[in-house]
Amino acid sequence: IFDQGVDNVYCQDDGSTDGTLAIVRDFAEVTAMTSHSEYFWQASIMNGLSDLAHNEGAEWIVPFDADEFWRGTEGRTLRQVIEGAQEPKLVAKLWNYTTPELKIVTPERLPKVAFRWQEGVEIAAGNHDVSIPGGEPGLIEILHLPYRGFEQFKRKVRFAIERLDPQTKDRGVGIHHTALDGATEDELRDAWQRFNDQETVRDPMWV
C-alpha cells in the first residue's frame, strides 16, 4: 500500500493470533490499535479510523482489508489516480484470487470505494460503499486473496460467524460466511471446493 503512494495507515487488530500486530507496528507510518469488543463492529471501526486519519491530515480515505491489494489501473499508482480524480468517490472492482497466480474471471458482485473525506460521511458495512453519491469507476482495482488453504478458510468462516453481532447478521451482512453457519466439516469442504472450481485465468499478483 505504501508502494501505491499511501502516506499513512491506521489499523485496528481484531484479535488475530498470528503476530500481525507486532509486524505492522514495525512501520513508522502505521498507527495500530486493538479491539477487545464482543462483536466485530466493522462499519463503526472503519468510520472511526477514517475520522482519525482525517484529523491527522488525510484528505482521501482508502478503507482496505489486510488481504486486499489496491492499485490504479493502466499502470498508474493509487496516488496518481487520486490526485487526478474528478469526483470525490472512486469505485473499485474487486477481483478474487484462488492462489496468487490465478484470478477468478468474474469480479465480485459488490465493488469497494476510496473517497475524499467529508463531514458526516459514513462507510457502509464491508467497505462496499460510502454515503457520497456517484463515483468514478474503472480507475482503481483490488486484487483480493481471501483464503490460504482449507484450514484457514474454515477458521475464517467460523471466526466471522462468531464475531458478527446478531442484528448485523439479520440484515444479511457477511452472507458469504453466515450462509455456512452450522455447516459440517464435509459441507465446509464442499464450499471450499466450489470457491476453487470457479473459472480462473492466470494473472499473477504483482506483490
Image (cartoon, helix red, strand yellow):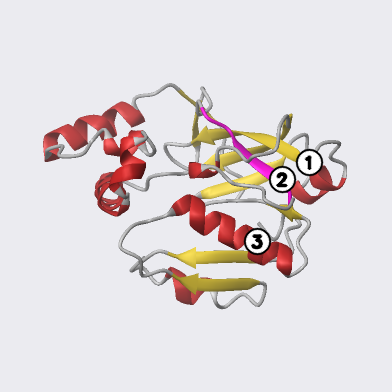
- Taken as a whole, is the magenta stretch helix, strand or loop? strand
Depth check, front residue: 176 or 146: 176
Magenta region, residue range: 110-117
| Three-letter code, disc 1 | Pro
Q: Which element carries disc 1, helix, strand or loop?
A: loop
Given residues 194 and 51, the one toward you in this image is: 51
N-terminal of the pair, mark 1 or mark 2, is 1
Dot label at residue 88: 1
Between the C-alphas of marks 3 and 1, the distance is 16 Å
Q: Residue at x 27, y 47 (%)?
A: 161
The image position of residue 83, as x and y in percent, is 86, 47
Query: Residue 172's quadrant in the figure?
Result: top left
Quick check: 188 left or right of 167? left
Q: Which residue is mark 2?
A: 115
Q: Is residue 66 visible?
A: no
Q: Residue at x 52, y 30 (%)?
A: 110
Which residue matches tag 3?
51
Q: Secondary structure at mark 2?
A: strand
Would you say the residues marked 1 and 2 are in contact, meaning their CB atoms lie under 8 Å apart? yes
Front position in the image: 126 or 25: 126
Q: Residue at x 57, y 61 (%)?
A: 48
Q: Viewer-nearest of labels 3 and 2? A: 3
Q: CA distance from mark 3 to mark 2?
A: 12 Å
> What amino acid does circle 3 point to?
Asp
Please tell me how crowded label 3 is: few (under 14), some (14-19), or many (20+) other residues with Cα within 10 Å: some
User: Mark 2 belongs to which amino acid?
Assistant: Phe
